[in-house]
Image: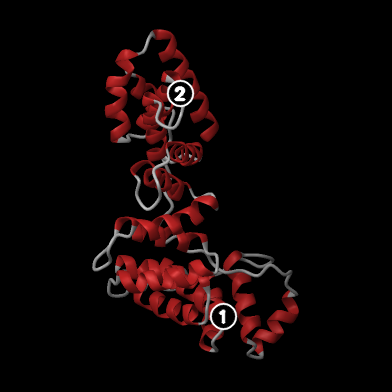
Amino acid sequence: MTLISVFSRVFRGHIFLALFALATLASAAPLDLPATKVAADKGDADAQFQLGRVYFKGEGVAQDDTKAFKLFVKAAEQGNPKAQHNLASMYFDGRGVERDEAKAAEWYLKSAEQGTSLAQTALGSMLLAGKGVQKDSKNAASWFEKAAAQGDANARLQLGELYYFGGESFPNDDKQAAQWLLLAAENGNARAQNLMGILYEENRGVQENPKEAAKWFLKAAEQGDVKAQSNIGRLYTTGYGVEKNPVTACKWLLISSAQKEVTAINLLEDFQKGLNQVELAEGQRLAKEFLAKAK
């Protein structure tokens, strides 16, 4: 039995953040439900939004998407930006209404134009993928920039990735990528951390810095990013930015390989031939320990 097959049974599968897993805006303040119902019935848009949120979440009432949708419609049509965002999310997810990406984009736009950062990010995502709207990378970047300027972590990530990879009629720009990815990486985003590691390793947008590359790869790897696990394992095989360590290299390559990361699988296949039984056993133990905690 290979080391990879041993760990493939332990790992349950890497969970990626869906591009369109869009959050629903909520209120932090406790709600006076009877008073809110009275105000909503009288046409108060904020009360309608708040009551819709309660039904959407099922907080103090039976969860009811249909009621939530109707209340969000009433508030959104009066111009409430939070209700517009939530209504868009319900159209996108098909909750309380038939799924309609075009309607979702329409309401995200209304909310985004009023400065709602989550709506700006969501609209940018739809424009980037051509979901409900015509694909437009430049317009997507514009909305991401607006949300990123407000501190939206997901917008910073997506803007950084857009500059990193480039898009249709949108040129790659490593300096811009590094600027936005660094903000997302510092905010704890593993994908951004892995990309920052690559930028530092490859002298792209930032000056080559082996220690910085290793630092960001390790941060992302510890959060479960499979590509970062492969990257930090690779660095430990060569001693680039870290002290060369065959056991630690083995650990990370095993973890990444168990998740079917092709680069790690290919590297591990040759690398493990040069390890003795003690190193293999210790690498296996460390990998098992990590995967057990990650369950």
Query: Where on the picture, by quarter, is residue 48?
Result: bottom right
User: What is the count of numbered marks?
Assistant: 2
Q: Is residue 203 above or below residue 292?
A: below
The N terminus is located in which quarter?
A: top left
Q: What residue did someone put label 1 on?
A: 71
**Local crowd size for mark 1, using a 10 Å CA cut-off: few (<14), some (14–19), many (≥20):** many
Would residue 41 be visible to someone looking at this image?
A: yes
Give whichever of 63, 110 is nearer the camera: 110
Please provide percent x and percent y for residue 221. 46, 37
Looking at the image, residue 35 sits to the left or right of residue 209; the answer is: right
Looking at the image, residue 188 sits to the left or right of residue 28; the answer is: left
Q: Is residue 28 above or below residue 234?
A: below
Please provide percent x and percent y for residue 104. 41, 75
Give whichever of 125, 270 is nearer the camera: 270
Would residue 258 be visible to someone looking at this image?
A: no
Residue plotted at (41% across, 14% down): 280
Q: Earlier in the sequence, mark 2 or mark 1?
A: 1
Q: Is residue 124 above or below residue 257?
A: below
Amino acid type at circle 2 is: Thr
Please provide percent x and percent y for residue 51. 64, 76
Residue plotted at (65% across, 85% down): 40
Q: What residue did someone put label 2 on?
A: 248
User: Which residue sits furthest front?
Assistant: 207
Mark 1: which secondary structure?
Answer: helix
Residue plotted at (31% across, 65% down): 129
Give whichever of 38, 225 is nearer the camera: 225
